[in-house]
């Protein structure tokens, strides 16, 4: 139990939907969601396949605890070969869609092939049908979700869909569910669009059962108390959201600014949590309307915001006047500090548009930052861009969000992502990312460990693959010096392995501000068959990490791709506590390989593979 | 006819004085404060586990209604009307009053799934369950409501039925007092 025990295989070429029993042997080895779906993908596709070819597959997967009453148990992930990176991609989302899939009786859905014309999957418990999506093609995520509910006369349907960006091949399109929760990174929505799959709509009423309900309730209730009693998950995140980080990271000297030219942003205070709660002079309201929870979440870090109706971005656009998903830290950083824009309302507007059209705000903001540097360097001009693209221009941010969301005008070039864009204009060194994916909101010069975590992340630059910020800035579970690279390889490995297990459980990684694997294990053990301990979860995590690595190696990635841009390795931070520092990657990487049991070329040794049962 | 039925029911199923009588009871009510709700659905999970033996929000007796564009989350369930129209409308006498809690209870043995109660209820809080062919509604879990215990923000509390307004009264009193002191 806890696993539903079956998966749905949708052949978009043939137009068929078939039920298959879940491979329970693999479930014991890879748990679910990220791990188990990666196992299926690795077994079923050629690692060298073009991500946008019909031979690539796209998997939506829940974890065993998805749909239970454990705190945060609403997660699902989208696993595929990423359109932005060409590496293994796994993007995790909250909201309510994951529970609906599980309640309909499915652990995962595997999409293969390519439909001849646009379709959406309608899944009501056991009944799966591919439906004509002609009326929704060319419309936004918001209109698609509303349109499907209206068409079927059922407001309780949950929908995950792509916007126009995903149809047009914008390389960092997301899959967005419940209007503003997203499987955001690596272009998983682009892969979905390449298959002519517009949306997945689900209604599930079957119920989710656990192995030992009494023990499960005991374990999950105790774990909820740990979250409630913790300063971060019990107070900081519900009150301030992830935006609590903006001023903290700026003061740490690790807030990448204007395409990483700087590592502190003078406008940080204008775009963080405090600014969202400040009463506006224009309408007497605050940007933040309320906090909000995803399914089953007792933290409730989500932000619901409302744009000032007198702001230029929405004066002629009443469709954005309502409350919707507001800024979280990564989005606020990318749309703000990375572009030098300190206008909170403009950032909120751009964020709404990212949700509406399904684009990853991190890659969008970072790529716009790179374009702004190209513009200021005179490499591109208004002839290409159609408008001034100087750092700090809030109007340019809003217009480019609209254009990129629809893949129109210069937005189609922003839609390439920073790697292809800067290569196109002969300045590849201006792309701030790893393996084709842009950095999130922490500078690897001021926080050494996160630089190594970025360089070695299997899905390209990412904070969620090993959030060493917890230790380096917040002291969770132990405080380490962010400016010190000694000891960081072991820290990065520990975070990466533990996170891979958490991402496979159905629960949210934000719980790890308060929980260790010792808090996860009793919940999983009470819900699922098999003996689940913290040690075993850590081993499952390490197995998943190495499986992802072998996929990437087979796809053509090498140790040379475990690298950072020269800007982080050569140009020292100019201000703040990290002044004079570059990232010491070359010192950390060999030790990391050694700890991983990999060769100097970054390949898992035979001994490591056999130790992990790979 | 309805009047007769009600008298019959009162005599046989519930303490004298309920509804509309003079008896003194210490019943409790669910008190809901949408300002505190985050929309997490832990109440729906707890309710469905108690009544269905599985985590199944679609079968929950309490629903969190989301008003997306306003950013509001409003838990909603049966308020256990003193004069319950569902009870009065039921042609098979399947709805009775639990003496201990005041909850209006549906007997699965008597319910024939005619749905007349769902029409009679002005609030929509009694609903048909296709899986069983019976109606389902909040039964206050026998006096220990699981939704209230599961709510992480105290948006749902179980309080003295005579004083569901006490928290609001306290808040208003504080405002009035502050004004008086100013």
Image (cartoon, rainbow, N blue to C red):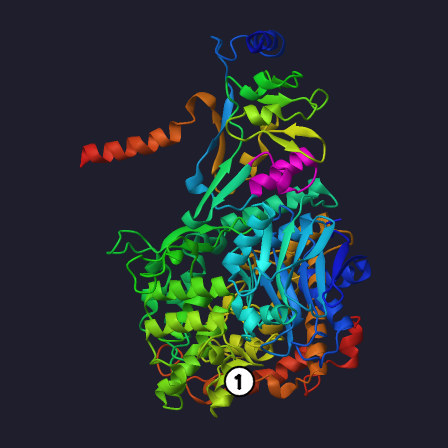
Which region is colored magenta? B42-62
In this view, A130 is above or below A406:
above
**Which quadrant of the figure has residue A454?**
bottom right
Q: Please tell me whether residue A429 is drawn above or below residue B177 in the rendered image.
A: below
- The answer to which of A372 and B160 lies nearer the viewer is A372
Q: Tell me residue A583's x, y (percent).
A: 49, 83
Tell me if residue A474 can be seen: no
Q: Which residue is mark 1?
A: A420
Q: How many marks?
A: 1
**Image quarter for residue A573?**
bottom left
- Name the chain letter of the residue that bears numbered label 1: A
- The residue closer to the viewer here, A346 or A556, is A346
**Per the image, is A170 magenta?**
no
Q: Does residue A194 appear to the left or right of A373 in the view shown?
A: right
Q: Residue at x 44, y 39 (%)?
A: B34
Can you give x and y, in whole percent of width and height, for residue A528 in the image?
74, 51
């Amino acid at each position: 139990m806890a696993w539903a025990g079956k998966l749905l295989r949708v052949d978009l070429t043939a137009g068929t939907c078939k039920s298959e029993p879940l491979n329970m042997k693999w479930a014991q080895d890879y748990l679910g969601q990220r791990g188990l779906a990666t196992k299926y993908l690795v077994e079923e596709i050629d690692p060298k396949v073009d991500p946008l070819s019909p031979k690539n597959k796209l998997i939506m997967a829940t974890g065993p605890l998805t749909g239970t009453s454990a705190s945060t148990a609403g997660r699902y992930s989208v696993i595929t070969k990423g359109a932005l990176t060409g590496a293994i991609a796994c993007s995790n989302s909250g909201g309510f869609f994951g529970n609906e899939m599980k309640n309909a009786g499915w652990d995962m859905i595997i999409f293969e092939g390519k439909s001849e014309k646009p379709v959406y999957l309608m899944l009501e418990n056991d009944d799966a049908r591919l439906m004509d999506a002609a009326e929704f093609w060319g419309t936004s995520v918001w209109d698609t979700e509303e349109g499907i509910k209206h068409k079927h006369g059922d407001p309780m349907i949950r929908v995950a869909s792509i916007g126009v960006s995903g149809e047009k091949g914008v390389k960092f399109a997301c899959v967005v569910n419940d209007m503003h929760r997203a499987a955001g990174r690596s272009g998983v929505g682009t892969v979905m669009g390449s298959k002519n799959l517009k949306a997945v709509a689900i209604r599930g009423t079957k119920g989710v059962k656990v192995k030992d309900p009494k023990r499960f309730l005991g374990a999950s209730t105790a774990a909820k108390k740990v979250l409630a009693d913790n300063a971060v998950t019990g107070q900081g995140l519900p009150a301030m959201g992830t935006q609590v980080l903006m001023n903290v990271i700026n003061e740490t000297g690790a807030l990448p600014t204007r395409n990483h030219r700087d590592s502190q942003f003078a406008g940080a205070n204008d775009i963080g949590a405090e600014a969202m709660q400040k009463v506006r002079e224009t309408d007497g309201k605050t940007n933040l309307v309320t906090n909000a929870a995803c399914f089953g979440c007792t933290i409730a870090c989500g932000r619901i915001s409302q744009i000032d109706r007198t702001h230029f971005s929405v004066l002629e656009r009443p469709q954005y006047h309502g409350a919707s998903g507001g800024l979280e830290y990564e989005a606020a950083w990318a749309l703000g500090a990375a572009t030098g824009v300190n206008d909170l309302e403009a950032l909120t507007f751009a964020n709404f548009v990212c949700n509406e059209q399904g684009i990853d705000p991190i890659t969008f903001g970072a790529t716009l930052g790179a374009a702004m540097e190209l513009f200021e360097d005179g490499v591109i001009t208004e002839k290409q861009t159609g408008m001034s693209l100087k750092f700090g221009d809030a109007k340019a941010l809003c217009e480019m969000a609209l254009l990129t969301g629809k893949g129109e005008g210069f937005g189609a070039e922003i839609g390439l992502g920073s790697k292809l864009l800067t290569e196109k204009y002969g300045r590849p060194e201006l792309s701030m990312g790893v393996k084709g994916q842009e950095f999130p909101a922490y500078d690897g010069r001021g926080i050494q460990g996160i630089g190594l975590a970025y360089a070695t992340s299997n899905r390209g630059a990412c904070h969620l693959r090993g959030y060493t910020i917890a230790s380096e800035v917040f002291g969770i579970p132990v405080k380490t010096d962010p400016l010190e690279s000694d000891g960081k390889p072991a820290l990065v490995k520990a975070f990466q392995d533990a996170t891979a297990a958490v991402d496979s459980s159905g629960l949210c990684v934000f719980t790890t501000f308060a929980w260790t694997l010792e808090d996860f294990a009793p919940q999983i053990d009470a819900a699922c068959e098999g003996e689940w301990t913290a040690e075993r979860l850590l081993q499952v995590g390490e197995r998943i990490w190495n499986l992802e690595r072998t996929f990437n190696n087979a796809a053509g990635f090498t140790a040379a791709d475990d690298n950072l841009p020269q800007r982080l390795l050569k140009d020292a931070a100019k201000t703040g506590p990290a002044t004079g520092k570059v990232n010491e990657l070359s010192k950390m990487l060999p030790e990391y390989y050694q700890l991983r049991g990999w060769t100097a070329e970054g390949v898992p040794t035979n001994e490591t593979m056999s130790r992990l049962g790979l | 006819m309805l009047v007769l039925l009600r008298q019959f029911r009162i005599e046989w199923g519930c303490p004298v004085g309920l509804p509309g009588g003079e008896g003194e009871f210490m019943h409790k009510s669910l008190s809901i404060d949408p300002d505190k709700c985050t929309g997490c659905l832990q109440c729906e999970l707890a309710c469905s586990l108690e009544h269905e033996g599985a985590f199944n929000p679609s079968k929950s007796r309490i629903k969190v209604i989301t008003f997306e564009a306003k950013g509001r989350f409003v838990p909603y369930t049966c308020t256990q009307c003193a004069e319950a129209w569902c009870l009065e409308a039921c042609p098979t006498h399947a709805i009775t009053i639990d003496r201990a809690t005041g909850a209006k209870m549906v007997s699965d043995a008597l319910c024939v799934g005619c749905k007349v109660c769902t029409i009679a209820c002005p609030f929509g809080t009694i609903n048909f369950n296709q899986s069983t062919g019976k109606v389902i509604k909040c039964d206050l879990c026998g006096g220990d409501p699981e939704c209230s215990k599961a709510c992480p923000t105290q948006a749902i509390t179980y309080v003295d039925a005579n004083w569901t307004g006490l928290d609001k009264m306290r808040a208003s009193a504080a405002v009035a007092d502050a004004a008086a002191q100013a």
